[in-house]
Image (cartoon, grey):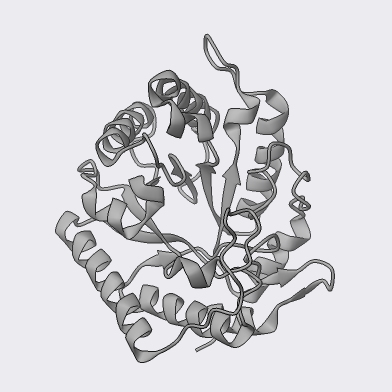
Amino acid sequence: MSGALEAPNEGEWGYTVRFEDIDRIKAAGFDTIRLPVKWSAHAGTWGRYKIEDHLLERTDEIINYALSQDMNVILNVHHYYDLNMEPAKHERRLESIWKQLSKHYDSYPDSLIFEVLNEPHTKMTPKRTDALNKRIVHNIRQSQPHRWIVLATAEWGSLTGLLQSAPPADSRVILSWHYYDPFSFTHQGAEFFEPMPPVGTHWGTKAEIAVATADFERAATFRDLHDQPLLLGEFGAFDAAPMEDRVRWTRTVRKLAEENDFGWCHWGFSSNFRAYDPEKEAWIEPIRAALLDD
């Protein structure tokens, strides 16, 4: 559910979560929504770092509706930029945010899944990310021994970061990685990057598919080594990519995830990298088919 609650305020990036969108997602055949939330924009900066009530209430509405429709929900901390720049000043704050969330959702079913942090990077090194993940998992386990917890790794959640990680030995932890390779293809025309990757880049040669296949095999080997499930937490190609190649890449990555027994979440629904067109109120059919059809 990208572009909504991970904005500083819901709606500022052009999308507000609608319950009918959750209905559409379920009807299409998906069983899970991932809900990115910028908690750091709505929590205190000292003391107990209290989360603002209005954000919890809004998040409750979305989670409760999705759960009532028999959907799983992955709730995460998204776009905590300050933590990546100054971890020594913000790690305690993130720990407090998760203590509050853990307490608030203590009675919720296992179909609510916690994701500790999206795409740690810069000064959140693999070693530092591992240490923070372990502390937060320990804190959650004090009251919720069986809650599924997703752990992202450093280097923007990339394969490189995954392979450098040392996850805690916990039978209810799901490891996570994100796949946007090659970046020059998946992010072409994305104006939020400087310099913007130029449009017109194609993808789909045998050599390119072989690279992706090898990447997924390396991720699967790491998964098997640690005997923990692995989630492909994000993948997608920006809207400006040539549609035929975008479809080919999306279908290839989705099938590689399934062939390697990874769960997956596509980024995203109807903001950028979208699979649904809110202006037309219709799925972008080639992308929907790439995600769900054989």
Q: Considering the image in quadrants, where does the N terminus appear?
A: bottom right
Q: Nearer the viewer, residue 134 or 189?
A: 189
Residue 70, x across and y down, in percent = 59, 59
Asked if residue 72 is positioned above or below residue 138 in the image, the reply reads below
Q: Is residue 209 above or below residue 84?
A: below
Farthest residue toward the right? 279
In the image, 95: left or right of 125? Answer: right
65 sits to left or right of 278: left
Task: Please identify the residue farthest to the left as the structure is shown.
Answer: 225
- Say which residue appears at 23% left-offset and 41% top-offset: 168
Compare residues 234 and 136 and report the one nearer the observer.
234
- Residue at 52% x, 35% y is 81
Q: State which quadrant residue 219 falls in.
A: bottom left
Q: Residue at x 77, y 61 (%)?
A: 20
* Identity of the residue drawn at 31% across and 28% down: 135
Residue 79 shows in this picture: yes
Residue 128, quarter of the rendered image: top left
Outermost residue toward the top in this view: 47
Q: Position of residue 157 (x, y in %)?
A: 39, 52
Q: Residue 56 location, x and y as percent? A: 65, 32
